[in-house]
Image (spheres, rainbow, N blue to C red):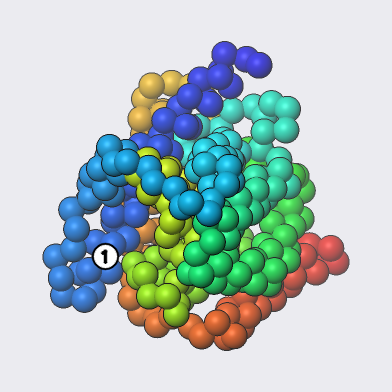
Amino acid sequence: MSPEFILYLVINTAVVLAIAPLFISLIKKVKAWTQGRRGPPLFQTYYMLAKLVKKEVIYSPHSSWIMRVTPIINIAAILVAALFVPLVFVPEPVGGIGNIILLLYLLALAKFFMALAGLDAGSSFGGMGSSREMSISAIIEPTTIIVFAALVFVFKTLNVFEMFTLSAASGTLSTPTLILIGISLFIILIVETSRIPVDNPETHLELTMIHEGMILEQSGSNLALMELSAAVKLTLLMALLINLIVPFGLATTLSAAGLLLALVLFLVKGSVLAGVIGLFESSMAKMRFFRLPSLFAMAFFFSTLIIIIEVFS
């Protein structure tokens, strides 16, 4: 492994951990503004994570080792997955890092253990949350595979690094197929991060919660890890969308000026996308559970259309 790639691993991990909570706070801020409220400070998520780390971890008497290892497995899987999606610098791919199929498996691993932890505590709310999450996953994961398959057909590669390099080199912002994929990726982002209209991350109402139900029994530093992994996952999917659709500013060489410029541009583009997510959530109500497939069908249709176009073109 080259020194350049080792430096990439350090930079990408540090950047995603540093800015992930900021986007969560920014989405909350935008939603509050649309409702005529001031909203939380932009650093509120950082304060919350720091507060949770200091609190005691309490386990249900019915829980097993699954509840204890899930926060660690969850954050580890998400952080490794984040290495597959460059935020500010695209290195030469090494080994399997960057493979889009392995990326999907890492995200599925984190979701699987989170659902297990929701069941493990013996809580009825956790059981409902896990059941709903797996029901949604059974519908959305084939769509996710089709969306990522469309990406592979468009760029003719399985490696995310190469996709970003090709996107930055060809200026694919104006390509109709990439715009359709962008819409599909946005839907995947909303679903995978449990946001409105699929789920409401701000509520603990037992009749509607999905993601919050699965982590309801987590506490202290374990809850901090779960919340941080959710923030990192959101940033990961945002970076995938941003660096494919709006690739300008992404550094391809190691230089202090280039990395700083790429970081500033990513923060700007990420803040704009976070604002769009906040406005999107504020303009919609949570959908009924059995109406969700109609949302997923849009991403499936666009991606299938792209694959057909690429195959027969």
Q: Along the line of sight, which residue is nearer the eye, 56 or 92? A: 56
Residue 101 on image: x %, y % = 73, 47
Name the element at disc 1. Answer: helix
The residue positioned 26% from the left and 65% from the top of the image is: 30
Image spot of residue 114 (x, y percent)? 56, 53
Viewer-proximal residue, 152 or 291?
291
Say few, some or many: other residues with alpha carbon within 10 Å of mark 1 (under 14 / 14 to 19 / 20 or more).
Answer: many
Residue 209 in which image quadrant: bottom left
Residue 173 shown left or right of residue 232 in the figure = right
Q: Which of the image's four quarters has the N terminus?
A: top right
Q: 18 and 73: which one is in front?
A: 73
Q: Position of residue 248 (x, y in %)?
A: 47, 44
Question: Would you place residue 122 above or below residue 266 in this image?
Answer: below
Q: Is residue 142 above or below residue 78?
A: below
- Answer whether residue 197 is visible to the viewer in this image: yes
Location of mark 1 (residue): 30
